[in-house]
Image (tube, helix red, strand yellow):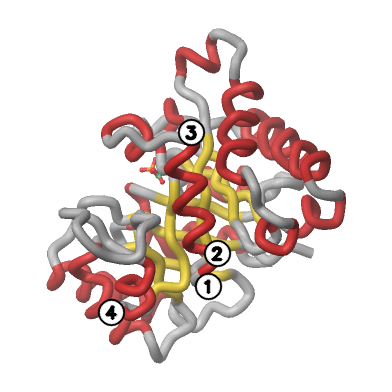
Amino acid sequence: MRKKMIAGNWKMNKTIGESAALAEELKTAVGGVEDVDVVICPSYPALDRVHSLIQSSKIRLGAQDMHWEEQGAFTGKVSWDMLKDAGCEFVIIGHSEQRTYFHETNETVNRKVKKALEKGLTPILCVGETLEEREGGKTEAVVEDHIRGGFAGLTSAEAARCVVAYEPVWAIGTGKNATPEQAQEVHASIRKLLASLYDASLADSLRILYGGSMKPDNAFGLLSKADIDGGLIGGAALTAASFRGIVEAARP
Ligand code: PGA
């Protein structure tokens, strides 16, 4: 049985002080939840402060991206050891906003995934099609390409430590979530692909989150589907009340 995970992606929102205030509220709202893995991913400057606040709770910390290099002349980039030092256990990789605005490719995603795994961080690998791709009947092909690209060269022991997030681009930040049936269909196809790339037991144990306008009022329907193991939450992660609503919907 896969344990559900709810991860909040705060994106480029909240100052350090605002992040700390939300972390305090979340500690009260969901800090004791043990039957769902609760993760929050603030901006880089807020990581350390948020970590010190949530340490005494069950909430765990993630970052929104990282570079694959160890250190050096890479202005603007952040390395795995900086993230670990700040308390991160997870890192979002290949988010569609990175792919769309910052030239992220399957190749850079794969390098980041490999480095994260090598250094003991859990990658949350994002995949998903645009509206144009969906309407052109290419959803499965695009998602397959993202999965093959992201997992390229991973051993099954490495692959087993990944989390996948299916995030249809047309659903992100639009208020237009995929229906539970639409999401389930893609999640099942991802699991089938992973079974063919590795084996059935790996595919069966790997968590596949859904992301894209998940809210308290649609979370339960999505999370009830057989292959939907949690959520990667943007907008609704920015207030404690709505994030809590989603965490509650994920509880067994
Ligand atoms: P959203 O974002 O919940 O605001 O649609 C999800 C994401 O981009 O991870």
First in sequence: mark 1 vs mark 3 = 1
Q: Secondary structure at mark 1?
A: loop
Q: Which residue is mark 2?
A: 117
Mark 4 vs mark 2, foreground winner is: 2
Q: Residues within 10 Å of mark 4 (few under 14, many from 20)?
A: some
> Does mark 4 have its CB less than 8 Å from ligand 1?
no
* Residue 106: image location, x then y, percent: 49, 36
How far apart are labels 4 and 2 at the CA level?
30 Å
First in sequence: mark 3 vs mark 2 = 2
Ligand 1's quadrant is top left
Q: Which residue is mark 1?
A: 120
Q: Taking 186 as reference, is 3 above or below it?
A: below
Q: Residues within 10 Å of mark 1 (few under 14, many from 20)?
A: few
First in sequence: mark 1 vs mark 4 = 4
First in sequence: mark 4 vs mark 2 = 4
**Would residue 99 be visible to someone looking at this image?**
yes
Q: Are marks 1 and 2 in contact (CB under 8 Å)?
A: yes
Q: Which residue is mark 4?
A: 24
Question: Could you tell me which quadrant the C terminus lies in?
Answer: bottom right
Q: Secondary structure at mark 3?
A: loop
**Would residue 240 be visible to someone looking at this image?**
no
